[in-house]
Amino acid sequence: MNFNPNNCRNESEVETKLIVSYLLPKLGYTPETWHQEIAFGNIRLDFLSFATQVIPLVVGADSPMSVVMEAKHPKQNLDRHLRKLNRYLTSLSIRYGLITNGKEIRIYQRVAGDIQLVFKCAGQDVDTRIDEIISLIGRNNLKSKISDNRELKDRKNTLVSFDLISAAPLEQNNPTAESEPSLISEPEQIPENNPVNLQIKSDLIVETPKKNTMKIIAVYHNKGGVGKTTTVVNLAAALSKQGKRVLVIDLDSQANTTFATGLVKFEDEEQDDLKDCNILHVLQSEDGYPIAEVARQSNFCHPEIDVVPSHIDLMQYETELNQLDYSRMILIQKLAEVEEKYDIVLIDTPPSLNFYARVALIAANYLIIPSDLKPFANQGLINVKDFIKKVNGFKKQIGKKPLEVLGVLACKISTNSKFVQYSLPKRREAIPKRYGLEIMDSVIYERDDLAKCAEQIQIMGNMEIADPISVLDFKPDSIASQEFEMLAIEVLEKIGKN
């Protein structure tokens, strides 16, 4: 079997087509000797392979028998991820690390407290250079290195358990492998700043389940028409395709996100099946209407996401809700009830400085500010900053960390070549200079595919029912799809969920 890097369009395909289907078998690793999505504290490895099948898994100081393999999006520059790979290898005392984006393959070796490049080739050359890779990290070659370092076995290995350790369920490409508790021997070799908290045990292995750290991201600008809903729904789809469990909450009475995710399957108000169970009821009831019951699964994208729908009734109850003592914090409480169910929550907000926008930002950990970078949107950033300041003042009173702004996201940007070449860079530079806000690396351009995927319909009897789908499902190979894939990667990096 030969490898073609052109077949890898995203990070998931680099994992499945290069690492799982090609490299691991070529290197002699069997399903029992490699594990996917395995976590040690706040370190999460894409793949960890072993020369020998050991139960329990043991990662030893200066151990030559394990290899970390990290997959990145084909458009990602591998140099940006070397610091993180260095931390993985040095913190866990693992000797070899392979990192690839499909177009390029590199192998690094840990030497003291640093890593050194020992192999590099283009993805298209991997077939002709596979023997070199095998000589470095092939399973049989690592076995021989174990023999050469047999003195390691004479050391007394102290078994330890991790506080906050997990082995995530393996994906379909490795259905037979079992999740095992993971251990590190010779803990005295681990640096003091190692992110894994260790509890020493003499002869007992205790596996403490990792507490899921659900991240809540509000998408907000007080200027309308800047691509907020388009960003929320397609970012949700992109995060879902990255393997994240995603919940979307629509907090705008216009219910654009509810429409955009295909939850409105009725023609008139008499058939309205959202009226009696939506975000309004979540906010009105201190004890009833938990998110788990109100959220609906949407087939807007695959894998599916869950959506808490909005409703136009939200508009008339704002004053009443604002007078309730618990109203501003009710969403915090109800999201805490589902923190083990979701990895990421995206909240779509109204384009205003109203109560619902305040509820969203109080509940959120992070904020994305979509903007078309036009004058009125830019002037609105002054209001946004002032609003964030007030929200953070309230968050401080209730003991919550301040909102972390991920940045201003350039949205609905013209694809005119002269504009992109000359005007766009100046507009992007103006954001941090004039408003003191970071500008995100990703850019979402105004493209026909984004409009077409939102206009999909299905015929039900004599009715035409809106049936929108994400641009990633509508045209997976489109430029618009790739832009949201890159946005998802950037967001995951910034919130520590990659």
Image (cartoon, grey):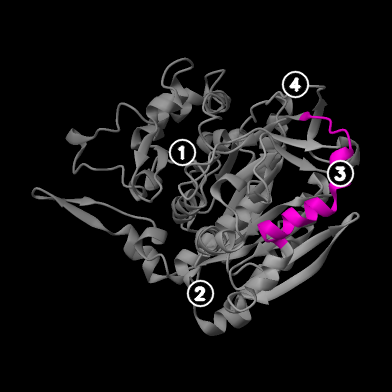
**N-terminal-most mark, 3 or 4:** 3
Q: State the SS at label 4.
A: loop
| Residue denoted by label 4 | 204
Q: Are marks 2 and 1 in contact (CB under 8 Å)?
A: no
Magenta-colored segment: predominant secondary structure = helix
Residue that badge 2 annotates: 4
Q: CA distance from mark 1 to mark 3?
A: 53 Å
Alpha carbon separation for disc pair 2 and 1: 40 Å
Badge 1 marks a residue whose secondary structure is: strand
- Rendered view: 395 above or below 31: above
Q: In x, y percent, where is residue 239?
A: 51, 50
Q: Which residues are magenta?
A: 137-160
- Sequence-wise, which precedes: disc 1 or disc 4? 4
Q: Secondary structure at mark 2?
A: loop
Q: Which residue is mark 1?
A: 249
Percent x, y for residue 138? 67, 61
Task: Tell me which numbered mark, 3 or 2, is placed earlier along the sequence.
Answer: 2
First along the sequence among labels 1 and 3: 3
Q: Quadrant of residue 443?
A: bottom right
- Disc 2 marks a residue whose amino acid type is Asn
